[in-house]
Image (cartoon, rainbow, N blue to C red):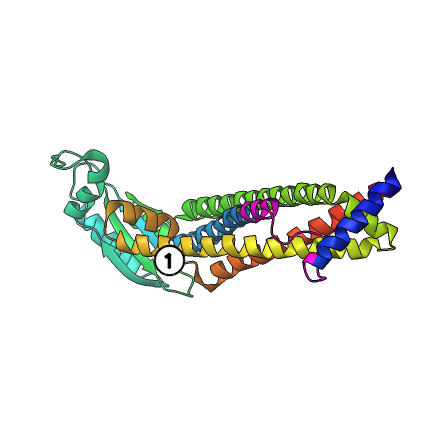
Amino acid sequence: MRAARILLAIKTRRDERRAHGGAMPLVPAASISGRALVTVIAIMTFLAGLTAGAAQLVASASSDWRSSVATEITIQVRPVGGRPVDPDVARAAGLARATEGVESVRAYTREESERLLEPWLGTGLAFDELPIPRLIVVKLKDGQTADLAGLRKALSDQVRNAVLDDHRVWVQRLATMAQTIVVIALCVLALVLVATALAVAFATRGAMAGNRDIIEVLHFVGASDGYIADEFQSHFLRLGFEGGALGGGAAVLFFIVARAATAAWTATPGGDQIEALFGSFALGWAGYLSVVVVAIFTALLTGLVSRGTVRRTLRTIA
């Protein structure tokens, strides 16, 4: 019975080769399962590309946030005892200007300080009776270390109602948040790749099950496991490159469209919030390169997983 099935498969295989001009691949080049696998790989590559690009955007935006925060410090001068606060503000601003490493000093007026509270307290309120602190923004020179310890001591000695904030806590929180998001993105990327590998493995097993008689024929005529594995690997590698190209191209197109959309939303409340969080969605060459690398890696992973699955299955058949 087994011999008859093998002889029938040999005759069928020979007829198929004659019908295709003598060149008939072990795995059909175009099939419903193949197109479905290309779609799955494209979707997975798109998600992986989005994840890699989003991680790049967050890392870049975090670097901009930290550099912006680290180049400025603030001095808060609180009203004390009902006496005018303007002399204390002028004295604190003078001490800041005299500090080494300071580039510029800007003291906010009372009206400007009141406007800073409007997003939380609303507009049209009378702030005359409230002890609103005054803010002094100090910009530091790039590449030069400012004497913040000396400024802090001078303020504590001469302007006791002034508090210096170097935003160190905020910088640490931003760094921690960015690192956490990047780690989460890498975990999601790993899960997407694992899901892709599992899909390829199941598709390879299905293709081998559908061509089991042909594989047995090839074994019968002396074909090696390496030859059969090469046939499956080339087939699934081609599918991987097709799906990777589609998914990677869609991810690149998404970021290009997102950048154009954020440029169109500039100067709107929603657009300003998105730009504050993610920048202008400008990935740069490094971001687009990461998407391309993910697409190529997905295609190579498809071929390697297919080859490994074929070899394991062939050992089972043997």
Of the pair 300 and 14, the residue shown nearer to us: 14
**Residue visible at 49% across and 44% down in the picture:** 181
**Residue visible at 22% across and 39% down in the picture:** 119
Quadrant containing the N terminus is: top right
- Whether residue 93 is visible here, answered yes or no, is yes
Left or right for 278, reference 302 = left
Looking at the rendering, the stretch of residues picked out in magenta corresponds to 19-40
Asked if the stretch drawn in magenta spans residue 21, the answer is: yes
Left or right for 257, reference 33 = left
Displayed quadrant of residue 5: top right
Q: What's the residue type where badge 1 is placed?
A: Thr
Residue 60 position in % (x across, y down)? 44, 55
Residue 133 position in % (x across, y down)? 23, 42
Q: Name the residue under label 1.
A: 71
Residue 236 position in % (x across, y down)? 65, 52
**Residue visible at 39% across and 48% down in the picture:** 167
Residue 256 position in % (x across, y down)? 39, 57
- Whether residue 156 is visible here, answered yes or no, is no
Asked if the stretch drawn in magenta spans residue 192, the answer is: no
Quadrant containing the C terminus is: top right
Secondary element at image label 1: loop
Left or right for 124, reference 246 = left
Of the pair 155 and 157, the residue shown nearer to us: 155
